[in-house]
Image (cartoon, coloured by chain):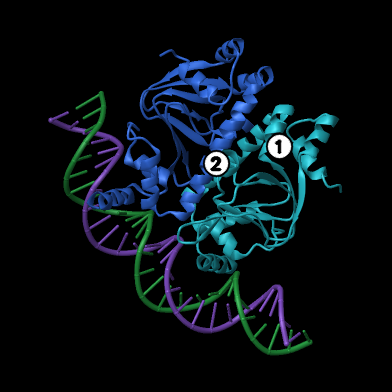
Chain colours: A blue, B cyan, C purple, D green
Amino acid sequence: MKHHDLILKNIAKHITLEKEETTYFLSLLESKTVKSKAYILKESESCQYLNFVNSGTLRAYFLNKQGKEWTIMFALKDWWVTDMHCFVKEQPAMLNIVATEKTEILRISKINLDLLFTEVPKFERFFRILFQNAYIREQVRVIQNLSLTAAERYEKFLAKYPQTIQQVTQKQIASYLGITPEFLSIIRNRRAKA
Amino acid sequence: MKHHDLILKNIAKHITLEKEETTYFLSLLESKTVKSKAYILKESESCQYLNFVNSGTLRAYFLNKQGKEWTIMFALKDWWVTDMHCFVKEQPAMLNIVATEKTEILRISKINLDLLFTEVPKFERFFRILFQNAYIREQVRVIQNLSLTAAERYEKFLAKYPQTIQQVTQKQIASYLGITPEFLSIIRNRRAKA
DNA sequence: CGTCTATTTGAATGTACTCAAAAGCGGTGG
DNA sequence: CCACCGCTTTTGAGTACATTCAAATAGACG
């Protein structure tokens, strides 16, 4: 499988590119290999890139004032991820993004993305649909966080993410669910008995 | 102030329209007055419209299996609102949308919106930016729901929404914050003392 | 093998909920 | 215009869900 196949497939879900548009698009991308536990973004840094996960897994998290981690998302293969707020508004990052295993990304800088929108306006459509879906997903998560117990949220998590989610610790899952690792341990224990 | 001034200003925040594009866009809109407590969308109905609030306030909420309401958003003047999931995927609505006071909306059907994207591709850009911002806002809400206590979330709510938010009851605010009305009452009581 | 971190377990505590009842408030009809 | 009805808000007691802190155990990695 070639380097760019996955991202081109991802894009083909929503728009159809001409050959020269494809070439142009690919020319704007940078490829990068990220070691397990290496960061591609740290809080307070500038957030210049929108990242596509070609293989591996990234985890984006937020550190609150008490120094606790809250996981915003696990970005698996075929996902897009960045600190969107800071990428868009060109402000220092609030999120940290770290690889939970060896990960290959393709990334595009804000400058190049703006260029892309100008040169190939079709991409406005692509990202319109991408953000539309992202918005819907976050809204569903808000509803679930409001209306479900921790145990129910854990079930949803298991249903949503494949078991293949490598190297993700329970501590990290707990921080995604909004609970302590100790309490997740209790939930898992009860669950195993039932 | 003319009927369409607000929505045109809203759009002008992100894209610039030619005169005939403006005319065409306006021709796709329907205007509608909604009485206080009237619904513009009910669960299981088809969700055909994307709505712009010209004046007044709408409230979108979700009913869970136990029959409890969870408020997804208060859409004030100058906001866009619909059950996005069902609008996009053309599925029965999961949300209810109701006017908390007399409200004027401008709405566009899915068919007309698709037409608009074809005829005036600039609107892809407009909605790309709109959804991008919506996504960022929901993500912030997720972070806050995870990492803040109910009392802290209430403070954020007060800071975010103007006092002018009419006719909104504490019960509804509680359902937005993810707590019971009883507990919001306690929070307000403690707050008044401090 | 030793070290470091993750996970489990338990006791004590805090946050938020349920249920019930009283008080407040707004709208409607007589 | 007032009385009543229905809904919202408040208050309180008892409870459940989830956290904190501490200590023991298990796993991962160099």
Toward which corner of the image does residue A76 lie, by quadrant?
A: top left
Mark 1–mark 2 distance (CA, rounded to whole Å): 21 Å
Q: Is residue B61 above or below residue A20?
A: below
Which mark, residue A81? Answer: none
- Residue at 54% across / 23% down in the picture? A11
Q: Secondary structure at mark 2?
A: helix
Residue under label 2, please give it: A136
Q: In the image, which is nearer the foreground, mark 1 or mark 2?
A: 1
Toward which corner of the image does residue C4 lie, by quadrant?
A: top left
Q: Secondary structure at mark 1?
A: helix
Query: Quick check: do tags 1 and 2 share a chain?
Result: no
- Residue at 84% across / 30% down in the picture? B20
Q: Is residue B179 above or below residue B72?
A: below
- For disc 1, the neighbor class at 10 Å (few under 14, some 14 to 19, many from 20) is some
Q: Position of residue C5 (x, y in %)?
A: 30, 37
Is B103 on the left or on the right of A10, as rendered?
Answer: right
- Specify the subunit that label 2 lies on: A
Q: How many numbered markers are drawn?
A: 2
- Residue at 61% across / 10% down in the picture? A20
Q: Position of residue D6 (x, y in %)?
A: 60, 75
Q: Position of residue B52 (x, y in %)?
A: 71, 46
Query: Would residue B58 be visible to someone looking at this image?
Result: yes
Q: Foreground: A184 or A162?
A: A162
- Specify the subunit that label 1 lies on: B
Amino acid found under the numbered disc labelled 1: Asn
Query: Would residue B121 be visible to someone looking at this image?
Result: no
Is C18 on the left or on the right of B81, as rendered?
Answer: left
Q: Position of residue B174 (x, y in %)?
A: 55, 61
Residue under label 1, please give it: B112
Toward which corner of the image does residue B136 lie, by quadrant?
A: top right
